[in-house]
Structures are given as structure tokens and as C-alpha cells.
Image: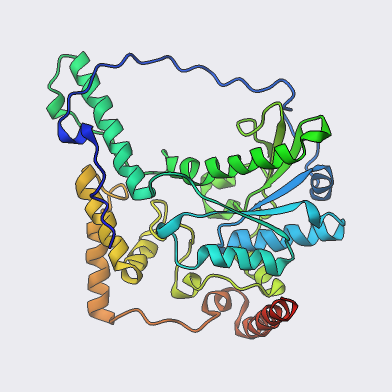
Amino acid sequence: MQSAMLFDLPALQGAPVAPMTKKPCRPRKVHASVPLEPSTTVPDELIADADWIVVNSSGGKDSQAMLTHVVRRAKALGMLDKVVVVHADLGDIEWGGTKTLAEEQAHLAGVRRIEVVKAKGADLLGRVLVRFGKLKAKAEREAIDAGLDPAAVKVAPAWPSSSARWCTSDVKRGPVWTLFTRLTAELSHLGRPVRILNCMGQRAAESAPRAKLAEVEIDRSASNGKRHVTVWRPIHGWSDAEVWREIARSGLPYHPAYDWGMRRLSCSFCVLGCEADVVLAARLRPKKAAEYAAMEVQVGADFKHGLSMAEIIRRAAELEKEQGPVRRPPTGTAMAGFIGRSATALYLRRRDLVRNRLTLAS
């Protein structure tokens, strides 16, 4: 098991920290060409107006349903060549096989261009430790400026949270924006800002904050004088049952983590995940859970506010003692809970046919 304790941060070893003058934050200027509002919210018009249609795929059920939904509409318009599927590879913190599955789903959907992007540098646990070092140094500087003992400072939590989702910007949004830069350069001959339609699988039913998101909006932070980025959330109003019906219709495989009982995919230990999910993840990935617990000790803060990984591991151990090891459920268990066993059986046959057709074509 790779230890998260190998990072060498001078600030954590008692090295002196030089006083730093805080620079005033400058408001980010948005290029004058970037529109305030989208020119349309009609799906087919969004597709027709775009130069690139970027479908963000985590490999999870929502992005999978969104993928086939968008591809079907683009194909009907004769514009499938505009579609690019991008998967942000999170490495060992995501469920095994996620990257491969996201690529397979895109291939089976008929998309020819698939991009896998990955953030440079440390993984999530390494970033937590680096962030802790920066927060500690900042707290010590502020204490010195105030004439207080820097050794007694309280350091802000270094873990991501609902109010500090730096993990999303660091390991997902940033690498995807790098792809936007490459796609923009490929169409520089147009002599105007390249229009990118950025498709996200966020749904209103997931949370109150996501319910407030617009189905279509201009992403002014991702836009500039060379590219205009419009965010489209094609399945924003869908229910869980509608998502599973779309997956059943498409015949594309979904991640087995859902059959195990997980409600979310992506990071196997998500700070926004419910207690049942993270406890189940600790039963399925005990070594990775131990790494998170070790990092809690290093940074002096719980993985989730009010719920430590140490406690999660303890609860997982109790369930293991009471119930025994987690047993692999039958394939289709998650889907059957929403659309029924008969429809799920039809899906499983369709999935095998779809996979076989791809194998024969290859």
C-alpha cells in the first residue's frame, strides 16, 4: 500500500516561515465578446450552433444516460462528428475500471473521439497534505502578525467539503479546460471564438444546490476571446427512474459499484457521499480507507465534517462482524430496483448484443 506519509513539507517540519505580504485579489476580466446569456436554450439549436459538443463522462449512471441522450440527438441532426467525450481520470481514488468503462461506453455509443485527461502532480491525498501545509503556514503568518504564538494556531480543515470543492476544480475542471484549449486551437482557422457546448450530467434531484443550477448557461469563467463555452445540463430534470430507463434503452454497460449498493460513483470515498456509501466503500476498499485514516492523523481533521474515516472504518468492521464479508449482488440489481426485473432482464440481453456487435466490428 502506497503511504500518504511520504510528502516532505518544510512548513510541517518546523522550518521558519518568512512573512508574506498579502496581494489584493483582482477581479477576473471576462473578454468583451463573451455573451451574458445563451442565444438559445432549445437542445437541437444548441447542438447545431456548437463547433464542439463536449460530453463529460465520469463513467457513472448520470453521465452515461446523458451521453446516449446527447449522442442520439446529435446523430439525428447529422452532427455526431462534433461530439467529444472527455473523462477526467482520478487515478486510484476512483472505483476500479472506471476509466476503461467510460471509454467503452463512448465507443459503444458511437463516439469516435474520446479524450482522457488527468491532473498533473499529486493525487487527492497528496493534495490534501500540500493544502494543509499552505493553510498551516498562512495561520502561522497571521499569528505572528498579530503577536500571537504561531505554535498554538488552529489550522483550517484541508479536506474538500461542500463549501470548498477544490477537488473538483483541481482534478476535473482544470484538466477539462486544458482540453478546451486544444479543441479551440484546432479550429483557430474559423477566425472567430470557437463555440463549445459543455454537457454536464448534473441533475436537480441530486441535491438542493444542483436543483438551483440552470439547464443552460454561459460559463464566463471558462470563456475568453478565443472560445465561448455554454454549459448544457441535458438531464437536469430527470428522475433516477428516467436515468435507469435510458441506460436500459441504450444497452450500454454500467459500473458494478451500483449493484454493490453505491449511490454515487467517481471518488470511492467522496466527502459529499452519504454515510452508507462511505461505510460500504470502506468494506470494499479497506486498504484505501486506511490511507485516508492515516491522512486524517497527519492533517488533524476528519475526512468528513463530523465523521472521521477512523469511525467509518469502525462501523464497517462492525458490519463485517455481524454480516460477514460483502457478497457480490446479481448483475442488474441496481437497475431492477427502478424499472423492474423483467425490463432489467431485457437490458442485460441487449447489453450483451451491443458488446458483441462492437467485438465483431473490431
Tell me where residue 312 appears, x and y as whole percent: 27, 61
Tell me: 312 left or right of 248. Answer: left
* Residue under the point 76% across and 36% down: 194
Tell me where residue 253 appears, x and y as whole percent: 61, 73
* Residue under the point 54% across and 44% down: 175
The relative height of residue 329 versus residue 273 in the rendered view (above or below) is below
* Residue under the point 22% across and 23% down: 17
Q: Is residue 113 visible?
A: yes
* Observer-nearest of 128 and 304: 128
Residue 178 quadrant: top right
The relative height of residue 345 versus residue 5 in the rendered view (above or below) is below
Quarter of the figure that contains the N terminus: bottom left
Tell me where residue 249 appears, x and y as whole percent: 71, 73
Q: How many marks?
A: 0
Tell me where residue 42 appears, x and y as whole percent: 81, 46
Tell me: 12 left or right of 254. Answer: left
